[in-house]
Image: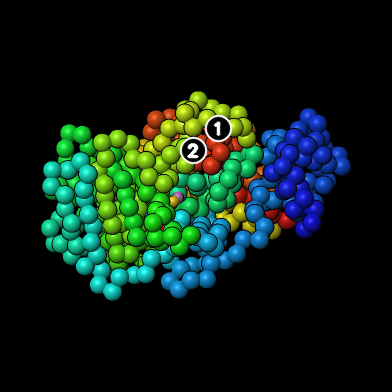
């Protein structure tokens, strides 16, 4: 155990040195180092010769010491932070086509506001670059505008952050800052059009009821927004229900924005005000390097120049294996393994999903379902056949409709670690 942890730490801190020690200088497992690696992962490694250098074996890549969430109405998610409360869903709990509410991840930047006694009297203000500012209660919103229901993925902008080297600051999400529930609400578009957008309207700015962690009522926890075209998109909702029930307090009860495909932070929970802006919104969470990515790549770990950053809009393509847990030990003699999971691609769709069992030497293409509606993640499935017993890693990668494919390691390093979409890797062991 000590040894495993030290190898993991070494990979995180100094992957080249870890390779030199574990794999030998040329990046190939051999002799003493092969035995050490085999002992660390629990078995022989049939495809050791293909193991890429600089990559911690998947079996050792799990962060130690993750605490399970204890909250009424929620499954045992992995707690990434207590204050504010942040919890991700381990990939194997994301197996459902439609994510049940108890398994949906939690990302707070401040405190959770007290739930209102009467949700229908919750007030939302629409002001700024509109012809007639509105103040509507949730009761009026439900009455006046058409309700729609869509299955849509919502993903935290920092999902995958833990795969950046060197470490990027923030919650160390693996792949579990995502879920695909069924949302019900009214179109934000309909409400904005009722207020009448002026030609100067280019962006929204969202304000919410969650108190700042400092306790200072004058401080805003988070205020992000959307380009007006995204705000006017059919699937951008003011949502009041998840999976047919009122939102849970932790997910924004009684009203939240849902802007699928964009970083989750634009989907303001407990929303009170939509300020229509004549410029890109500049509230807390919009500026410097927050939810922004470099325009031209920067040196990993280097100093960021905020002028070289732009707002992260579409989330990148990602896929997960959901029926097999990382580190699974399968029954002796197992050779065929059915695999399934989901794939999604921000504003795009997924056109292909492939898996490899030999560190990327050969890839096998998977069946991928079309989404029932835009922004619903897509289910994929296949079956792989292992050549023998031993330690294997199954990697999955998706390609979006624009031809962009997930990389083996997180690319486009940025200080706050957004948009890291390294392939999901699952280690399995079959004893000889
Ligand atoms: N008011 C408010 N809205 C918010 C946040 C927040 O801290 N305050 N967090 C955002 C972020 S960063 C994400 S990823 C999503 C997470 O939604 P969830 O907690 O329902 O999963 O909510 C977004 N909406
Ligand atoms: Mo987020």
Please give the name of the residue rendered at 64% of the width and 57% of the height, measured from the top-left corner: 328
Q: In this image, 55 relative to 298: left or right?
A: right
Number of marks in picture:
2
Query: Decide: marks 1, 2 in contact (CB < 8 A)?
Result: yes
The residue carrying mark 2 is: 289
Please give the name of the residue rendered at 20% of the width and 41% of the height, measured from the top-left corner: 129
Identify the secondary structure beneath mark 1.
Answer: loop
User: How far separated are the C-alphas under marks 1 and 2?
Assistant: 8 Å
Q: Which of marks 1 and 2 is nearer the N terminus?
A: 2
Q: Quadrant of residue 119?
A: bottom left
Which is more toward the observer, 251 or 345? 251
Q: Which residue lies furthest to the right in this view?
A: 32
Please give the name of the residue rendered at 59% of the width and 37% of the height, measured from the top-left corner: 409
From what the image shows, is residue 297 above or below residue 145? above
In the rendering, at what x and y percent does residue 344 appear? Answer: 41, 44
In the rendering, at what x and y percent does residue 205 appear? Answer: 31, 45
User: Any mark on residue 304, and which?
Assistant: 1
Which is more toward the observer, 31 or 306? 306
Task: Say if residue 323 shows up in the picture.
Answer: no
In the rendering, at what x and y percent does residue 343 appear? Answer: 44, 45
Locate the C terminus and report the quarter of the image it occupies.
bottom right
Identify the secondary structure beneath mark 2.
Answer: loop
Q: Quadrant of residue 120?
A: bottom left
Please give the name of the residue rendered at 39% of the width and 60% of the height, measured from the top-left corner: 217
Q: In this image, 186 relative to 418: left or right?
A: left
Locate the N terminus and report the quarter of the image it occupies.
bottom right
């Amino acid at each position: 155990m000590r040894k495993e942890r030290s190898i993991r730490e070494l990979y995180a801190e100094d992957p080249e040195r870890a390779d030199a020690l574990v794999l030998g200088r040329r990046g190939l497992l051999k002799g003493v180092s092969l035995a050490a690696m085999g002992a660390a992962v629990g078995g022989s490694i049939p495809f050791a010769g293909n193991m890429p250098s600089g990559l911690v074996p998947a079996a050792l890549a799990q962060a130690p010491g993750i605490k399970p969430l204890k909250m009424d109405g929620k499954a045992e998610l992995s707690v990434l932070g207590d204050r504010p409360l942040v919890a991700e869903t381990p990939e194997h709990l994301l197996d459902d086509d439609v994510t049940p509410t108890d398994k949906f991840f939690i990302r707070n930047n401040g405190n959770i506001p007290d739930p209102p006694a009467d949700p229908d009297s919750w007030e939302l203000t629409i002001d700024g670059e509109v012809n007639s500012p509105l103040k509507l209660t949730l009761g009026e919103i439900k009455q006046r505008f058409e309700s729609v229901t869509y299955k849509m993925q919502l993903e935290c902008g920092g999902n995958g952050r833990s795969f950046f080297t060197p470490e990027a600051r923030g919650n160390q999400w693996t792949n579990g800052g995502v879920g695909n529930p069924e949302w019900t609400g009214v179109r934000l578009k309909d409400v904005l059009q009722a207020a009448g957008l002026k030609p100067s309207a280019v962006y929204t700015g969202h304000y919410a009821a969650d108190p700042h962690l400092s306790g200072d009522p004058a401080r805003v926890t988070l205020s992000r927004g959307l380009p007006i075209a995204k705000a006017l998109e059919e699937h951008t909702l003011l949502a009041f229900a998840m999976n047919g029930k009122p939102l849970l307090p932790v997910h924004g009860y009684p009203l939240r924005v849902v802007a699928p495909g964009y970083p989750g932070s634009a989907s303001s929970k407990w929303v009170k005000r939509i300020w229509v802006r004549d410029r890109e919104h500049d509230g807390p969470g919009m500026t410097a390097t927050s939810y922004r990515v470099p325009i031209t790549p920067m040196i990993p770990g280097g100093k960021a120049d905020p002028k070289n950053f732009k707002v992260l809009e579409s989330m990148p393509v990602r896929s997960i294996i959901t029926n097999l847990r990382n580190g699974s030990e399968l029954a002796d003699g197992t050779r065929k393994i059915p695999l399934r999971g989901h794939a999604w691609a921000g504003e795009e769709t997924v056109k292909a999903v492939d898996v490899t069992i030999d560190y990327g030497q050969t890839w096998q293409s998977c069946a991928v379902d079309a989404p029932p509606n835009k922004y619903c993640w897509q289910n994929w499935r296949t079956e792989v056949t292992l050549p023998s017993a031993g330690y294997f890693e199954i990697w999955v990668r998706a390609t979006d409709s624009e031809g962009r494919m997930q990389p083996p390691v997180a690319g486009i390093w940025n200080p706050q670690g957004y948009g890291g979409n390294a392939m999901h890797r699952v280690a399995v062991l079959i004893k000889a």
